[in-house]
Image (cartoon, rainbow, N blue to C red):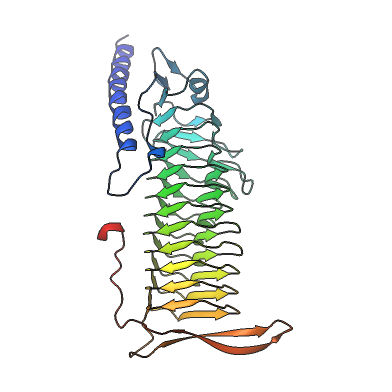
Amino acid sequence: MILYKYVGEIHLIKKGLTLVIIFLFGIMISIPSNGMIVNTRFQSQASFGIILYVGGIGPNNYTKIQDAIINSTDRDTVFVYDDSSPYFEHVVVNKSIHLIGENKTTTVIDGEGIGDVVIFSANNITMSGFTVQHSGDTPKVDAGIESRSKGNVISGNSILQNGEYANGILLNGSSENLVTDNFISENGNEGIFLARSTNCIIRENVITRNGHCAIVISGSTENTIVENNMYDNYATVSFWPGSTDNEVAWNIMRNQEYSGVGIWPGANSNYIHHNYLSNISLYGFIITRAQGNIIANNTIWGSNEGMHLNMANKTTIQFNNFIDNNQSAFFENSSFNRWKRNYWDDHQGRWPKCIKGMMRLPWNKTIVIHWINIDWFPVLKPYDIPLLRGGIE
């Protein structure tokens, strides 16, 4: 009896703290923590419904997360205690609710190796404070969290160890989603995969030790990838066919096995700027059969090749630092590219910098013609490009 009373008092305290957490969570989502402009589409709902509890005791308390969602309505909050964690469930969020875990390290949703762990099918969902792990491993299908809808916020979670070919987070035909302040690691394939998604922001995440890329953008437009720390993946950011008008800026990319940024056929007119790429084993940038991309104000340090162009046309490469790469840049069968005022540590003096490449004859590819591009006005000193937006290191 005394024990029950003691447990009850603990949960009353927790419920009081929960109200404070939910209130603060609403403030954090609606007010940016720094000087960045955040579109109002990502701001939280102005008012809240009731609070439903999972894993505690007393009224409005449920054993399973899905049962609480079924009994919720739009703008309600489902608060999940870590007392009963891990929750072995496949959660479908089909209402515009706030799904909040007590602690992102100890409040665990485990998919037991089958399918998606969490699916968003309604708009305007917020999810924070969970570890999401052990999805199935169907390529490009299974994920820790899959969003199929609009206006969702995925914030402050750990997305770990999802299937051998699965993604940590899959934005699948979604729009206006904000993915921020998550730790995304050891997922079998991509950390984050954007498929046919628009106007999403991926911001201030740590993405590391994933089996393939930190982030893949596929058939997606007008997304922003900003201020993420990405390291020890196979590759960092990869633009797949049909991805246009995306922005990748102010990210740290280091210790990748293959590439820092890969831009593949049909991924045109993207803007990649103010990123810091270091210790990339093969390519800092590799651009293949794409055109109209802008590469500006990046530091590319310690790659085998800093910039590799293959049938890449109308690329603007300007104001970048090329430092300590085995070969700063190389191109093959690439035309109308503009090299402007870059810093090259392998170039001395005030005369133009020659970038060596080659052209193959279309009718006889065994014939190679050595060719050059020219940066007419290379700078003499490296640019001071800060590691983070606003000059904070």
Q: Quick check: 391 left or right of 41?
A: left
Q: Is residue 14 visible?
A: yes
Query: Which image quadrant: the N terminus?
Result: top left
- In the shown orientation, is residue 317 left or right of residue 143? left
User: Relative to the observer, which residue lies in front, 62 or 388?
Assistant: 388
The relative height of residue 220 versus residue 42 in the rendered view (above or below) is below
Q: In this view, does 241 lie above or below 182?
A: below
Q: Where is residue 104 in the image (x, y as percent from the top left)?
A: 38, 37
Image quadrant of residue 249? bottom left
Which picture quadrant has residue 22? top left
On screen, residue 172 above or below 189: above
Residue 393: tell me if it is visible.
Answer: no
Residue at position x 61%, y 59% in the image: 241
- Give how far across and how far down residue 244 sits, in percent: 54, 57
Q: Which quadrant: the C terminus?
A: bottom left
**How many numbered marks are there?**
0
User: x%, y% of residue 160?
Assistant: 47, 45
Q: Foreground residue, 79 or 319?
A: 319
Instruction: Give the farthest residue toward the top.
Output: 1
Q: 212 or 77: which is nearer to us?
A: 77
- Relative image position of residue 261 (x, y in whole percent): 49, 64
Q: Which residue is drawn at 56% across and 43% down?
A: 143
